[in-house]
Structure formats: structure tokens, C-alpha cells
Image (cartoon, grey):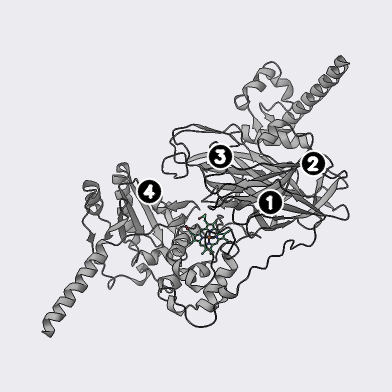
Amino acid sequence: MIKSTFLVLMTLVLMLLTLGVQAERVENFVLLDQTGNAHELYYHQSATAIVLMSQNNLCPSTTNNVTAFNKLQEEFEQRNVRFFLINSTLKDDRSSVVAFVNEHAIQAPVLMDKSQIIGEALQLNLAGEMLVLNPNNWALTYRGDANPAAIRSLLNDQTTPSPIVAATNTAQVPAACKVDFPHKNTGHEISYAKTIAPLLRDKCVVCHTEGGLGPWAMSDYNMVLGFSPMIREVLRTKRMPPWHADPHIGAWKNDISLSTKQLQDLVHWINAGSPRGTGPDPLQQTKIANIEWPLGTPDLVLNIPAYTVPASGVVNYQFPTIANPLDTGVWIRAATIVPGDREVVHHILAGTIDTDTTQLRRDSGVFDNYLIGYAPGNESHTFPTDTGVYIPPGGEFAFQLHYTPVGRETVDRSKIGLYFHTEKPKYFYRQDVVIDPTIKIPANISRHEQVAYYQFNKPALLHDLIPHAHYRGVASRFELLKQDGTREVILNVPNYDFNWQRSYAFVSPKSIEAGTKLVHTTWYDNSTANLSNPDPQREVPWGLQSWDEMLYGAFSYTFVDETTQAPIYDKILARVTQYVGFLDKDMNGKLSWRELPKQLKKRLVQGFKAVDTNGDGGLDIQEMYEISKRQQQHNQDGEKQENVDAR
Ligand code: HEC
């Protein structure tokens, strides 16, 4: 009797185990590779199979496995199988992995899993261990040595792949080849009251509160418990908190990301079943203090025109303007935005447009003076010490608003508060844009690159960067290219998200030598695999609307040698610099005949040699500037003549 009960029990246990093995589904994740590119597992749902191999620089036998892996990739890549290595060890870093990749001629990206949360979930044991996943249902169909049969079984039988889970014998392998997960099972020791709730309060509650932008409020333990699986998912896929800069590059004032330790704590705590533990619940006591003007009473408050946000649907970006009500010029030192309805106001960008700004420039959505980018947690912007933005009388204040409907119609009345310097500051806070209005993104392309630059003619300090693209923009980068040819990445946004327009403010301003180019690159995914793509069949031009695209990188800076007593900024020169920066495709600092746009070619058919004053066969910024000034003079004379004629 006892024996048979035991047998039944054992059978049940075995059945459960087998079921467990068959049903082992790999959850989605996003990881950055050794070069800082992002990879999302579920992006590859149209692949025939996904092959993942655990990699580790120090394990001697990895070499053999990697050689086998490379061979498999050569053999199966043509058949729409995708290959990735994953490095979950704590000992390797990007540069050692880059060296390893070069040494072993690896083509596949190496996914860097520094927090180990993905490697733990995949239950990696050894370097060189290969996993095969079926993208139809994300089931793990194989774990073991590099083995072509494991891939073939998926290619030949898409519907019912048989699990070939090989047992891995870890007893024989050298220690260097084992993947160690020291924190894996520590979740039950993590205190909700002391660690988890304070973390959520600091990093999430600003949006996830009653009446906040987040879709649910972290109002107490039970809410967090209920949302735990979803929290783990948004952490694995780097969706939350909404901060998209590569943590390896730069230090940012307004960084709202989690540290590796915080990420591990949160995931391990959830893995352990989100235990409540003891102590009062800090989230129950959290009330977001709602101080309307945290910087004090503003010198000027402007009401942004009210907007009725519908209950549902997609609301196009709004671009209201307000005529400047001031009759004297002012120096702005800071600004605060107070959203009218926090639940629907996703972000607001604010700036001013000068009276003499052309329609073309207005239509491109460019501010002459940028003031502030609001997102929850980024309510105020104080310019660097002793810098200011001068707003001349006339002109207008301009805004870009993004609303997200929440199921009820509401009227948003947001406002901006401005703070003036009492005395003229010493420096100008300047803003310009790397732009390319000539972009064309081919149809059905999964990674299309567009590059432009802005060359500084004087030494400067860089304060903020704002990458901007639309629904097809997937990654963005800013680099400094010095005159000696050295390059430095200063901001990498590997998983750009149109829904989150962010500025990235340097903790300490970045020094720029005269002659340095600020190079801005954006990658666009115009394929069907990009789920937010409005139309993969279309060749996409530049345009303000979100179904068109932009290469647009805004930046703010001060010139080291410019004081407000002695301005050196030249608006025409700035425009010419922008212009050369997108026409100069080979980035050699001058426009060859081939790089000139048609119109200019027509005008210079006879005169190219004359305007190429240094005779080097190309038109540099200075030479283009001379042409531009002459043109400007010509236009003004023309206008005067017209005025005379009109009388
Ligand atoms: C700047 C505001 C903001 C911050 C900070 C923020 N969230 Fe969110 N969160 C949102 C918004 C808006 C959404 C819904 C839209 C989206 O998913 O992008 C969301 C969605 C979510 C979802 C998914 C809900 C769903 O229905 O899909 C989870 C889970 C979540 N957030 C958890 C977190 C956690 C955990 C943190 C902190 C580590 C955090 N959020 C920080 C604004 C924020």
C-alpha cells in the first residue's frame, strides 16, 4: 500500500517534471552587446530558431565551443536562424569581450548580462553550453553541447519540436568554465520594508501614484505583489524605469535608472515570491508632496493654451505658441513646467522662436532658444551657473506637447513658470541642432543608418543632448570626432523609444576643442518586425509628422570664450555649419562638387573655383559662410530695391 502510494507519487512528480521541461518557456529580455547595441529576444519571432551560447573569456574549452558555434552560424544563418552569445560572468567586461570576439572571429553579438538576471533565469551552468529556442512558442528545445541536430530538428519540424534536453555534467569541468550566480537565491533575505519599498518610492512612485502618469499606483504592498510578474517583465526588457542611455557611457544629472544592485534586488525578491516580511509598509505612508513651484514663485507664468484630450485614440503632437507678452528683453535662469493633468501629459518641450525666424525653420519644429523638457520627475530645469538664455521682446514661446489618453476626456491646462536673472549672467546658454532634412529611409529595411555632424569652430562646454526621431527610430548615438581623428562616444541610446522624449544632462559639462565635430547617428527600423512602424512599405522622408522621420539631435552648450559682454555667436555661421554637417557625407570637413546640392551646383557651374578660395577642391564651412553672407547681402539689397520700387 505504502509502496504503491509512493509509486503514484513518484509518477506524478515525474510527470510534473517532464511537463515542466516541455513547458519551459523563455520570457522576453533585452540585453546590450559588447559594442553597446541592444537586442530584444522577441524581436526575432519570425526566425526559424534562436541559438544562444554561454560565453566566458577565461574558460579554456570555450575556444572549441566557440569554433563549433561559428561553424553552426555559417551553416544555418541563411535559413533564418539567429545566433547570440551570452556572457553572464562577473569577471569579463566589454573591452575584454571585444578582444575575445576579434581573436575568435565571432560574428554573433555577445549579450552582456552583468546583473546576471537573464543568465539565472536561463539556468546557465557552463561556458560553451548551447541553448536552442523555438520562436513559435519561445520554448527551450535544447540544452547541451554545440550540436547541429538540435537546430535541424526545429527547421524540419516547426509544429512539434521534440525537446532534446541533454543533461549537463558539471562535475568534470574546470571552475573557470562554471557560471557562478552568487546572488541567485538571496531573494527571501531581501526586506520589503527596508529595501524594496524605498527603492520603488525613489524610482517609480513619481509616476506610479494616484493621478500620476503611470497606469497603476504603487499604493501598498498588495499592489506591488499583484504586479510583481509584470514588474519583472518590464525590468528584463528595460522598459522601466523609462531611461534609455547605455549605462557604460557618461554620467547624467537626471539619470532615473536602477543600479545593477537595485535591479538584482528587485528581481531576486520577485523570484522569491515577493515576500512581505516584517515592518510597516513605507508605500502606504508615501504621499507625493505637491509643491507647485519647487524653485519658488516664478517671475513670469504663462498658461499653455488649454487642450481637450479625448478619452481614447492617438493624439498627434500639439505645437501651440504664445506671443511673448514682455516688452523688454529678459535673461532666463530657470524654468518649471506644471502639467495640468498629470495622467495625460506625457511630456512637454518648451522654448522660444525669434521674430526673424523663417517659416521653413518653424515648420521643422526647431526652437531658437530651448528652455526645458518636462517629463515626470523632470519638472524643473536650472541652467548651469552664471549662464542664461536671452529672450528678446517680440517673438513667441513655443511648445511641443505629447498627450496619452486614459479613458476619460479631460481638458489639460499646463503652465510654465520662468525665472529671470536680476543681472546679466556672464555666459550664454546656447542651443543648436544636428539635423538632416534630406534623409530617405528605404522600405522594408531593418537597420538603416543616418549620420550628420556639427563642427564647433570655438572651444565649448557641452551641457545637454536630446536625440529625437519618430516611430522608426530605434537607436541613437552622439560622438566627438576630434581633428586628430580620435572618436569618443558621449551618449549611446541603444533602445530609443519615441514615447519617451528625454534630454540627457551631463553631470559635469563635456569639454570640446575647436574643430571637433559632434557626430549624431540614428538607426531606423522600417521593417515589419518593428511593431510601432506605421508603414514598412514606404520610403520615408523627413517630416514633422510621426509617420515621417527626422534625424534631429539637439544640444546645449556655452562657448568658453564667449561672455554676454562680448558675444561671438553668429546665426548665419551656425546655419551654415548645420548645412555642411549633413551634406558632407564623407565627413572630411568640406563639400566636394559631388556633395553639393543641385541648386548650388547650378549657381556655381562657372564660379566654383572662385569660391573655393583655398583651392583645395572643396567648400569648407568658412567658404560656404562667405557665399551665404554674400547671398544674404544680395537678398537685403534686393529687398531694399523692392521697397523703393513699391514706393
Ligand atoms: C517617468 C514615469 C515613470 C517612471 C519613473 C516609472 N514608470 Fe512604469 N510606467 C509608466 C508609464 C507611462 C507606463 C505605461 C506606458 C509604458 O509602458 O511605457 C508604465 C508602465 C509600467 C508597467 C507595465 C504596466 C502595463 O500595464 O503594461 C510596469 C510593471 C511598470 N511601469 C513598473 C515600473 C517600475 C517598477 C518602475 C520603477 C523601477 C517604473 N515603472 C517607473 C511611467 C513610469
Q: Nearer the viewer, residue 425 or 327?
A: 327
Which residue matches tag 2? 569
Residue 327 versus residue 605: which sits nearer the camera? 327
Nearest to viewer (mark 2 / mark 4): 4
Q: Amino acid at mark 1?
A: Arg
Q: Disc 2 vs disc 1: which is toward the camera?
A: 1
Q: Residue 413 has which mark? A: 1
Q: Quadrant of the N terminus?
A: bottom left
Disc 2, SS:
loop
- Asked if the residue under mark 3 is in contact with the one under mark 2, i.e. CB atoms within 8 Å, the reply is no
Q: Is residue 361 visible?
A: yes
What amino acid type should be assigned to the residue bearing mark 4? Answer: His
Is the shortest distance between ligand 1 and the CB of mark 1 under 8 Å?
A: no
Question: Could you classify mark 1 by the number of other residues whose Cα lies within 10 Å: few (under 14), some (14-19), or many (20 or more)?
Answer: some
Label 3: which residue?
Answer: 546
- Structural distance between the alpha carbons of marks 2 and 4: 48 Å
Q: Is mark 2 within 8 Å of ligand 1?
A: no
Query: Identity of the amino acid at label 3?
Result: Ser
Identified by mark 2, the residue type is Tyr
Whichever of labels 3 and 1 marks the residue nearer the N terminus, that label is 1
Q: Which mark is residue 44?
A: 4
* Callout in the foreground (1, 4): 1
The local secondary structure at tag 4 comes to helix
Looking at the image, residue 107 lies above or below residue 273: above
